[in-house]
Amino acid sequence: MIARFLLLASVASASFILPAAHAQDTAPQEADAAIVGGAIVVTARRRAEELQDVPLSVSVLNADAIEQTGSYNIQRLTQLQPTLQFYSTNPRNSSINIRGIGAPLGLTNDGIEQGVGIYIDQVYYNRVAAATLDFVDIEQVEVLRGPQGTLYGKNTTAGAINITTRAPSFSYEGKAEISVGNLGFKQAKATVSGPITDRLAVRIGASVTDRNGTIYNVATDQRVNSQDFLGLKGSLLWKAADTLSLTLSGDYNLQNPVCCAQIYAGYGPTQRAANRQYPALTAALGYQVPSTNPYDRLTDLDAALRARNEMGGASLRAEWDLGAGTLTSVSAYRYWDWQPSNDRDFTGLDITAKSQNPTQQKQWTQELRYAQEGQTIDFVVGAFAFHQTIHTTGSQVQGADASAWLLNPSSPLSQIPAVLEGLTADNDIRLKNSSAALFGQLTWHVTDRLSLQPGLRLNYDRKTGSYDSAVTGTASDGTRQTVTFASTDPWIVAQRGVLAPQSFDARFSDWNLSWDLTASYEVSDDVMAYATWSRAFKSGGINLNGVPLDANGNPQLDVATVKPEKVNHYEVGLKSQFWDKRATLNLSGFWTEIRDYQAIVNNGQNSVLRGYLANADKVRVRGIEADFSVRPSARISAYASGAYTDPKYLRFTNAPCPPELSGGSSSPATCDISGQLLPGISKYSLSYGVEFNVPTALLGGDGQFYIGWDGSYRSTFSSNASRSIYMDIKGYSLNNLRLGFRNSDGINVYGWVRNIFDRDYMEVLATTPGNTGLIAGQPGDPRTYGLTIKADF
């Protein structure tokens, strides 16, 4: 299997980072010097270093690579990074994984944290939804794989995405870019920078994106799943002294598309009685979906769709050169305001008339770090403080078709729409989340070639949360009443089987100690080998999506909190350059074991069965990665990055059963899925690309015509927590083409086609409530094409 993977990477013949990292707009006569002498500088270890000198599995994308491939947000980076996964049904229900771990697929819960850290200009973004913004004025993106707790503010067990934007410049410069394409795609970006005084410089950037939806709603005569994004960013750099600089930054981002629809993707029979499954229910209501082929991209969702996602913040970064080392302080405030509206019955029927969870988040972070480099010892020590508040005010309202759809057809109540029509759950969910840490990492250069790098982190987490769901409905006498477990009214009894009230408070706090040890050895000037062993923790949390209730309606508070994940990670790697540094090959192998993996579980002892967030016993993820790049001349560059990933539940005995085993009176309450693959992870994934250019004197200056091809492939993966015969997403490849002209004056004009073969594929599949067998899905983008014009000045 390993040989098969390496062969796959070799055949694709390339890597990805180095060609992109050398400026693609370099004048032809200067290109050879850039190829031989150029080096990629990264800050993965919180100090500037050449990429090949860092004993860490890290990939780098510079601004040119991001822009040329159309990767203008984190989601699009997944086509360039084989071990980076992003899943989203809307901005709030988004997750980012590295090597398949970070957050379970489809699990959104305010009370737990992500395992992948997102940092923009050294500021930590705690919620994935608050980082789904379009990139504005990006300088570089680093994807770090494996635990990163001993060098970064927040503890992250799966990896980190470290994004750096361009700093204010003391020389005047600017950039403008306009793109147009099919589906009404329009995107404009602009940046200007320059000095105000000899010690004060400013930079301002903006990005606007608009595109029609890819799905047509026949009920509203509207295209949905559109794009409507605005991003603004500004920064002010003050050189207060020769040794002290202060950078004040602020940003504002608004996304307000008509989004997000998941449409009919199929039907898979469950164990529920036949008259309570999708075919019989739709027949009884005289309903027919517009198309049973999801790639017709048709829907008839009747509830309003909205995905207003507003986020922004400010930060102050101080960097003080103390001679022996550098002291850095990063203070930041961020907010996130989520205002959604969804159709959670996934049909044109009036079953769930309203379903939404508006959320407001505020976070404050403070990081203080000191870094020093020496002949024998380099080290970084730091302290980090974090505080966050989240307030979610959700509501769910049932519609006129709810009784017929949700109640047993053998009950007379199912024929009375008023039983469930207007049944309303008003949810109030609150969280206060605080953490503090001391961390440090030391590099001891034992010899000129051998280095040892131990790291340590002491971490404290505290969370307090509350969940309150008040339910009101219509009683059999026609009065509006609060739904309680004390009532014996048959209408109220039926209603609480659909929306049950509950209220509870919970607290979590814990100390933990993380550490890592890396040994690296320079086999030669161009070859380095390294090995890492680390122990990390992912913070515990609180169940803020509700917990199971007993027969009397009392919340089972023993499952209100979730234990931390305990991670043991092992990795070996080899970094090499050859052919006068024109080619690079980096290899890594990893083995990660997680105890108390945070996931949705079931407990057969519950009087009222309900899935809830808890801990699976043990998970293991192992694999091999390769990054290869080559630039034989100034005329051609190529890359390939590949990964083989083997993820498995080693022990998970109380998992929710897959849909084909659920819903019947004799169906098991839980399933043992030990030995099964984790969801969302492809065993094989690959990114590849090549670019050719030809010099020309067009427009009277040094320039070049170029053609570039970029592609990605991923094998089949599961889209359900417990693998199902209905829920695998078949493997697919996506290929993109660009053709254009650029010159040394900063002009770049190119046409592009993405998903050039118009490949049909699903981004995510999901079961729908009630075990009816209806499967909803989100088709990926069809073929898109357009033209981009860029100018640097």
Image (cartoon, rainbow, N blue to C red):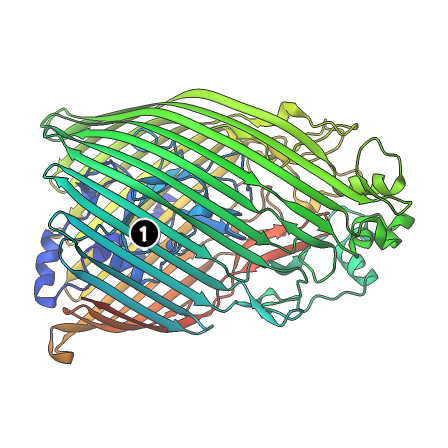
Residue 507 versus residue 406 in the image, above or below: above
Number of marks in the image?
Answer: 1
Left or right, 314 with respect to 520, comes to right
> Does any portion of residue 190 appear in the rendered image?
yes
Residue shown at the point (41%, 57%) measured from the top left = 713
The answer to which quarter of the image holds residue 537 is: top left
- Quarter of the picture holding the N terminus: top left
> Does any portion of residue 671 appear in the rendered image?
no
Q: Amino acid at mark 1?
A: Ser
- Quarter of the picture holding the C terminus: bottom left
Left or right, 604 with respect to 786, comes to right
Of residue 731 and residue 380, the one placed in the foreground of this image is 380
Residue shown at the point (62%, 27%) measured from the top left = 505
Looking at the picture, how far across and down is residue 26, in whole percent?
A: 14, 63
Looking at the picture, how far across and down is residue 706, in whole percent?
A: 23, 71
Residue 455 versus residue 299 in the image, above or below: above
Residue shown at the point (60%, 46%) measured from the top left = 357
Left or right, 712 with respect to 494, comes to left
Looking at the picture, how far across and down is residue 353, in whole percent?
A: 71, 55
Looking at the picture, how far across and down is residue 741, in whole percent?
A: 22, 74
**Mark 1 burial class by Cα count in 10 Å: few <14, some 14-19, many 20+:** many
According to the picture, the residue beneath numbered tag 1 turns out to be 641
